[in-house]
C-alpha cells in the first residue's frame, strides 16, 4: 500500500449535493456530536477542491443534470457515494415519472449507503469503507467514466432528450 494512497484515503474532502430529506443528517455528522473531521473528512466549498461527491437523496432528471456538472468539475481521482435508498433505486419515489432509478447509468457510483434515512454512523462508515477501497486500489469507478465516456454520455443524452418529455398530440 503506497504512502500516496494512504494519504488520499485519510483526507477525503467532500462536496455534498443535498437533493433529498437525508441531507438533514449531515449537520450532526459534520459537527461536534459525530465529528467526521476526526477521520479527515471535511466539507468543501466547491467541486474543484473535492474528492468525494455525496448525493444525499433522490435525484430527478433536472437535478441529475446539475449533479453531472458538479461531478465533471471535480479533479481525478474522484469518488461518488449515493446516500439513502432513493439513490439506490428511487426509494419511495420508485414509480415517479422523473426520479432516477439507476444512477450508475449516468455517473459511476463507488458505493451506496442504504436506509431511509441513513444515520450519521452509517455515513462515517461509508467513508471509512471508501478509504479502505482507496488504500487497496479498489476505488476505480472514476476511471470507468473516462474509459466509457461515450457510453455515459449516450445514456445521459437519451434521458435528457426533450422530445421524450414532450406531450404527444
Ligand atoms: S432515502 Fe428517504 S430520507 Fe433519503 S431522500 Fe429518499 S425518502 Fe428522503
Image (cartoon, rainbow, N blue to C red):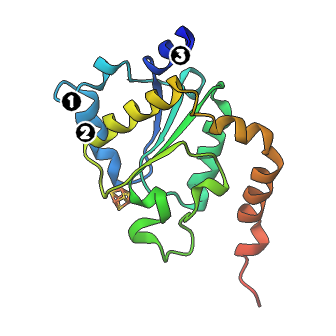
Horizontally, residue 122 falls left or right of residue 131, namely: left
Label 2, residues with CA under 10 Å away: few <14, some 14-19, many ≥20:
few
- Residue that badge 2 annotates: 121
- Residue that badge 1 annotates: 34
Indicate the position of residue 26 as horizontal and vertical percent values.
Answer: 31, 38
Discs 3, 1 touching: Cβ within 8 Å: no
* Total marks placed: 3
Q: Secondary structure at mark 3?
A: loop
- Residue that badge 3 annotates: 1
Relative to 54, say whether 77 is above or below: above
Horizontally, residue 142 falls left or right of residue 109, namely: right
Indicate the position of residue 81 as horizontal and vertical percent values.
Answer: 48, 42
Quadrant for ligand 1 reads bottom left
Q: Nearer the viewer, residue 16 or 167?
A: 16
Q: Is mark 1 within 8 Å of ligand 1?
A: no
Q: Is mark 2 within 8 Å of ligand 1?
A: no
**Upstream in the sequence, badge 2 or badge 1?**
1
Q: Secondary structure at mark 1?
A: loop
Amino acid at each position: 500500500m503506497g504512502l500516496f494512497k494512504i494519504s488520499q484515503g485519510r483526507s477525503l474532502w467532500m462536496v455534498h449535493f443535498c437533493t433529498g430529506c437525508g441531507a438533514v443528517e449531515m449537520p450532526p455528522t459534520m459537527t461536534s456530536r459525530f465529528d467526521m473531521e476526526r477521520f479527515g473528512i471535511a466539507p468543501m466549498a466547491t467541486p474543484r477542491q473535492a474528492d468525494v461527491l455525496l448525493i444525499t437523496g433522490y435525484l430527478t432528471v433536472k437535478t441529475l443534470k446539475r449533479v453531472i456538472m458538479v461531478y465533471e468539475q471535480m479533479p481525478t481521482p474522484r469518488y461518488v457515494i449515493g446516500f439513502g435508498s432513493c439513490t439506490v433505486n428511487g426509494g419511495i419515489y420508485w414509480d415517479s415519472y422523473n426520479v432516477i432509478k439507476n444512477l450508475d447509468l449516468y455517473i459511476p457510483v463507488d458505493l451506496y449507503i442504504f436506509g431511509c434515512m441513513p444515520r450519521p454512523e452509517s455515513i462515517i462508515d461509508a467513508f471509512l469503507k471508501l478509504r479502505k477501497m482507496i488504500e487497496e486500489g479498489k476505488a476505480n469507478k472514476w476511471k470507468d467514466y473516462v474509459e466509457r465516456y461515450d457510453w455515459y454520455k449516450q445514456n445521459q443524452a437519451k434521458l435528457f432528450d426533450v422530445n421524450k418529455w414532450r406531450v404527444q398530440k
